[in-house]
Image: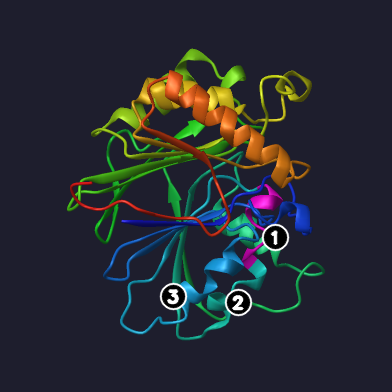
């Protein structure tokens, strides 16, 4: 299993030299195997960085795009995604129903006049997932996908992807407010992290820190300290904190990463870091 972080910024993209180390593109993650099966998690502006992964379509399984929710920073890369203008290409787009809105409805609104002038040419298949996977995974190629709702305005879902052949796993939990989550929401996420087996990689929202997070209550985001708390409770082997605030420059994030690694060490986490645009994580069999 190969994981590539195409975009790691939250709320809005940033373009400035002071943000170049960690990156300014908004959320998009690729999960792939060696045979060409590809899952895309969200479609922020980081999708453009991942576009070369989709140049070859012939003979490959249609990629699966899983949308955590429909806020613009997680969708704004979609209209410029080259694959969608290849008439020979296919894509599967899936998400649970949120406030009566399906993934197809959200995408069609996004590219409707007067906001976008060109229609997609690729063949699109839209799937409406249940609210919970309830341990009945959606099977895509070599992967098993599970999910649960998390606490965020207008709704959001975390996804778990397992590769049974290698025994590797990840949970992608962006845009959740852990401090405002009730006991049921917390248990659902921790259960997702713990089952059906140990978790290799947790990629989790940590947009704020504990010193400033109180000012943003109700915005739907966690602190990096809370991400450490969740990773410890989930016994994750590797924590990657993502969804950096648009005003968090490289200097601030570098210091935050140092603090994160100290806290993670104290919590007994084997590995922890902040997400960087372009970061590739190889989850190999037996590693």
Badge 3 vs badge 2, beta-carbon distance below 8 Å: no
Residue that numbered label 1 is attached to? 109
Q: For label 2, count other residues whose C-alpha is less than 10 Å away and answer few (under 14), some (14-19) or many (20+).
A: some
Is any atom of residue 188 visible in this view? no
Which tag, 3 or 2, sits closer to the chain's start? 3
Whether residues under marks 1 and 2 lie with C-beta atoms below 8 angstroms apart, the answer is no
Q: Give whichever of 168, 72 is nearer the camera.
A: 168
Q: How many marks?
A: 3
Q: Is residue 53 left or right of residue 1?
A: right
Left or right: 121 in relation to 117? left
Task: Pick the residue in front: 140 or 39.
Answer: 39
Tag 2 secondary structure: loop
Rendered position, 67 above or below 229: below
Where is residue 109? Give x, y as percent: 70, 60
Identity of the residue drawn at 37% across and 22% down: 268
Q: CA distance from mark 3 to mark 2?
A: 11 Å
In the rendered image, residue 74 lying in the magenta stretch gets the answer yes
The residue located at (42%, 19%) in the rendering is 267
- Residue pointed to by mark 2: 120
Q: At numbered mark 1, what does the secondary structure look like: helix, strand or loop?
A: helix
Q: Residue 154 got which mark? A: none
């Amino acid at each position: 299993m190969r994981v590539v972080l195409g975009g790691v910024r939250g709320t809005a993209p940033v373009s400035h030299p002071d943000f170049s180390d960690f990156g300014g593109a908004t959320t998009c993650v690729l999960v792939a195997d060696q045979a060409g099966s590809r899952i895309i998690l969200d479609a922020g502006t980081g999708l453009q960085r991942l576009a070369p992964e989709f140049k070859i379509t012939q003979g490959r399984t249609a990629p699966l795009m899983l949308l955590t929710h429909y806020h613009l920073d997680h969708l704004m890369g979609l209209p410029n995604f080259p694959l969608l203008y290849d008439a020979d290409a296919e894509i599967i787009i899936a998400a649970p129903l949120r406030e009566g809105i399906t993934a197809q409805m959200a995408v069609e609104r996004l590219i409707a006049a007067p906001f976008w002038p060109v229609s997609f040419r690729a063949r699109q298949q839209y799937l409406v997932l249940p609210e919970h996977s309830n341990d009945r995974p959606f099977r895509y190629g070599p992967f098993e996908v599970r999910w649960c709702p998390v606490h965020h305005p207008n709704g959001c879902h975390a996804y778990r992807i397992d590769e049974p052949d290698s025994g590797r796993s990840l949970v992608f939990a962006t845009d959740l407010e852990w401090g405002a989550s009730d006991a049921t929401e917390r248990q659902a996420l921790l259960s997702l992290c713990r089952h059906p087996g140990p978790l290799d990689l947790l990629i989790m929202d940590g947009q704020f820190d504990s010193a400033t997070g109180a000012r943003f209550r109700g915005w739907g985001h966690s602190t990096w300290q809370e991400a450490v708390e969740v990773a410890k409770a989930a016994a994750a082997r590797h924590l990657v904190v993502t969804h950096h605030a648009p005003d968090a420059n490289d200097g601030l994030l570098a210091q935050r990463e140092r603090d994160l690694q100290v806290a993670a060490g104290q919590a007994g986490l084997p590995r922890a870091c902040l997400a960087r645009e372009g970061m590739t994580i190889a989850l190999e069999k037996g590693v």
